[in-house]
Image: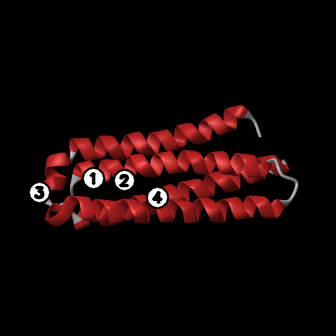
């Protein structure tokens, strides 16, 4: 796999991150009126972006292994790690925010988890296709 393709994937992940954070900042007042804490939503987006970068690095490393099962396990492990990180973040947020917590922001964060997971799996499958040489 080429460095150019890896950079393209990271750039795609970065554009998702920027689009969601920009949308949350622009619509911050509207989101707050709907009881969705836009700052918590931006925090969830940032956390998922960082875990997404780590996931892409895991997939890239797994592609170097001759055993194809390693790649499948890396996808499953990255998805599980991302789920556990978001679970821990939700628990910390609920405890830290107390009565001022925003359930809407938690639900929106879980929606972001789905968006990032779909991007990650599609990117991983593209990486595998390019590695195999079958476009």
Judged from this view, the residue extending furthest toward the left is 33
Q: Nearer the viewer, mark 3 or mark 1?
A: 1
Distance between mark 4 and mark 1 Cα atoms: 17 Å
Q: Which residue is mark 2?
A: 44
**Circle 1 residues within 10 Å: few <14, some 14–19, many ≥20:** many
**Circle 2 residues within 10 Å: few <14, some 14–19, many ≥20:** many
Quadrant housing residue 108: bottom left
Q: Which residue is mark 3?
A: 33
- Total marks drawn? 4
Distance between mark 2 and mark 3 Cα atoms: 19 Å
Q: Earlier in the sequence, mark 4 or mark 1?
A: 1
Q: Which residue is mark 1?
A: 40
**Circle 3 residues within 10 Å: few <14, some 14–19, many ≥20:** few
SS at circle 2: helix
Q: Earlier in the sequence, mark 2 or mark 3?
A: 3
SS at circle 1: helix
| Residue 115: assigned label | 4
Q: Earlier in the sequence, mark 3 or mark 4?
A: 3
Quadrant housing residue 17: top left
**Disc 2 vs disc 4: Cβ atoms closer than 8 Å?**
no
Q: Give the answer, above or below, for where 55 lies relative to 1.
A: below
């Amino acid at each position: 796999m080429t460095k150019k393709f890896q950079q393209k994937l990271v750039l795609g992940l970065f554009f998702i991150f920027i689009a969601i954070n920009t949308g949350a900042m622009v619509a911050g007042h509207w989101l707050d009126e709907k009881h969705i804490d836009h700052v918590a939503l931006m925090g969830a987006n940032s956390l998922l972006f960082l875990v997404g970068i780590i996931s892409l690095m895991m997939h890239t490393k797994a592609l170097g292994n001759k055993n194809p099962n390693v790649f499948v396990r890396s996808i499953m492990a990255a998805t599980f790690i991302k789920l556990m990180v978001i679970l821990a973040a939700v628990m910390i947020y609920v405890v830290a925010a107390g009565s001022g917590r925003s359930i809407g922001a938690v639900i929106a964060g879980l929606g972001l988890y789905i968006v990032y997971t779909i991007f990650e799996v599609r990117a991983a499958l593209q990486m595998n296709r390019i590695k195999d040489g079958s476009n």
